Amino acid sequence: MSDPDWIQKIVIVGGGSAGWMTAAALARGLDRRYQIQVVESQDIGVVGVGEATIPPIRLFNAMLGLDEAEFMRETQATYKLGIEFKNWGGLGARYFHPFGAYGLKAEMGHFFQYFLKLDREGGALALDDYSLCAQAAKGGRFDRQSDDPRDPMSIFGSAYHFDTILYGQYLRRFAQGLGVVRTEGEVVRVDQDTETGFVTAVRLKSGQSIEGDLFIDCSGFKGLLIEQTLKAGYEDWSSYLPMDRAAAVPCALNGPLSPFTTSTAREAGWQWRIPLQHRVGNGYVYSSRFISDDAAVGTLLGNLESEPLAEPRLLRFVTGRRRKIWDKNVVAIGLSSGFLEPLESTSIHLIQASINKLLQHFPDRRFSPANRETFNRRIHADMETIRDFLILHYHATTRDDAGLWSYVRTMPIPDSLAHRIALFRESGQLVIHPDEMFTPTSWLAVLLGQNIRPQSHTPLVAGHDSQAIAQGFRNMKAQIIGRVGAMPSHVDYLRRHGMWAAAAVAA
Ligand code: FAD
């Protein structure tokens, strides 16, 4: 049975991570009634950076039904347990943003408020001591998360570092296996209905015309359909997040195969280190207002652990979001929908979040404006949360050694973030919205890591026995040390589970 209002043909323009993640997920999530076609141009190529992810990527891969060991080998992946931040709160300062949760499940009720109480009473506690992920990262160890809620490992969390080009190719093969049609060619013209403005077809240089009902714009920063055709508009957030360029270069692994990303703040931005099985990804994300391209490339090359494996690539971007992410019959997914710099590895996650929401709000050919509007509001809310979380890293600093840091330390910030900081400073309370992607662990790690100290704790724990709480914390710390001590090293884990790619460097 078929309804004339049902969508039949979905055209995805672009074959980067966004295009192939979308194609794979739609092919898996929708029934075979839908025809899905991806148009990509090898001449134009992909951005090709974007190697660090956050834990929900595991759900995405699981939803597709990917075999984890195969995925790890095919994409030269490693595990990621969080991010180490160096020189962010101040020069010489360091903190770790772990995945998973702080404390152990049994004691988690008031974990942070107890922590504050002991801390205020002179306990001098280190937050990292109560995180399985932070401790495993420190020891270069890894183990599987447990499904048993009684097991401490149930609050472990992890994501991946992977080669984004290999991930795209892997998903392409997967999606083609599910019937997705790939067409090579450059889109040179977009046809629209003269009355409604809806996109009716894309035309390739070869003259081929590809018609469709729903168009997904995965064409990267330029937004071929959403911006160049529909003029959806762009909201520029660079006054809050002034980074607008990145220089990226791989090098050979000459340091540890750490199960975490390292972010080192520098004069005019920050540098990432992402260890993969076959190489290390490095990049300097910077603001062109505060450093020249040549100086930024010089800084990057001067801070590598081994010889570069390629020429540095320069990427330009404007931080912000598309005013309408879904307009008419075009949905923008990936860089075409906006860009927030990679400090917390959120772009691939936004692709995943957009796909999930598209499936939840899947349209018919009437393209209900209310449905579109709901989708747009939800993605906009995700982007605002990420924006605020990123700003926190820059704004809450004591650094005044360079122009960038003086600017971000004193710049006005959005009210939504100012409110979160004020409440935390007052009483250690966290504002977490129901649909929010960052967990209390993430906010805690960064707020405390950037030296925002609460003045008080909740009165609810004031009367609780400090000695008993302190004993509980000692037990927790000992259990965490014991559990991490029993974990295999990161490399051993990859090898033992058949995740080590043949072409990987020896470790
Ligand atoms: P692209 O990779 O640009 O793909 C666009 C596609 O559209 C290509 O296939 C291209 O050929 C095609 N195309 C364009 N025009 C046409 C046309 N006219 N005709 C036909 N085809 C066309 N994300 C993370 O999650 N973690 C990270 O650590 C991270 N680091 C990053 C670091 C930097 C410096 C940057 C800039 C981004 C980073 N990202 C990161 C973001 C991540 O790279 C992107 O979100 C992801 O790669 C998705 O890109 P895309 O598919 O939207 O665009």
Image: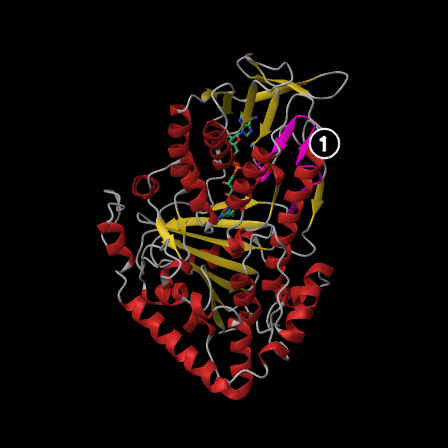
Which quadrant does the C terminus fall into? bottom left
Q: Quadrant of residue 424?
A: bottom right
Vertical placement of residue 270 versus 225, above or below: below
Q: Does residue 260 show up? A: no
Q: Position of residue 332 (x, y in %)?
A: 61, 34
460 horizontally vs 248: left or right: right
Q: How is the image coloured?
A: secondary structure
Query: Is 433 or 230 nearer to us in this picture?
Result: 433
| Residue at 39% in and 49% down | 250
Vertical placement of residue 116 versus 331, above or below: below
| Residue at 55% in and 36% down | 355
Q: Position of residue 475 (x, y in %)?
A: 37, 77
344 horizontally vs 484: left or right: right
Q: Quadrant of residue 141?
A: bottom left
Query: Is 474 or 206 nearer to us in this picture?
Result: 474
402 magenta-colored: no
Vertical placement of residue 285 versus 197, above or below: below
Q: Position of residue 138 (x, y in %)?
A: 36, 67
Q: Which residues are magenta?
A: 319-335
Which quadrant does the N terminus fall into? top right
- The residue carrying mark 1 is 231
Say which amino acid is labelled 1.
Lys
- Is disc 1 placed on a helix, strand or loop? loop
Query: Is 227 or 370 nearer to us in this picture?
Result: 370
- The total number of labels drawn is 1
| Residue at 45% in and 59% down | 99
| Residue at 55% in and 22% down | 11
Q: Position of residue 376 (x, y in %)?
A: 68, 39
Furthest-right residue in view? 195
327 magenta-colored: yes
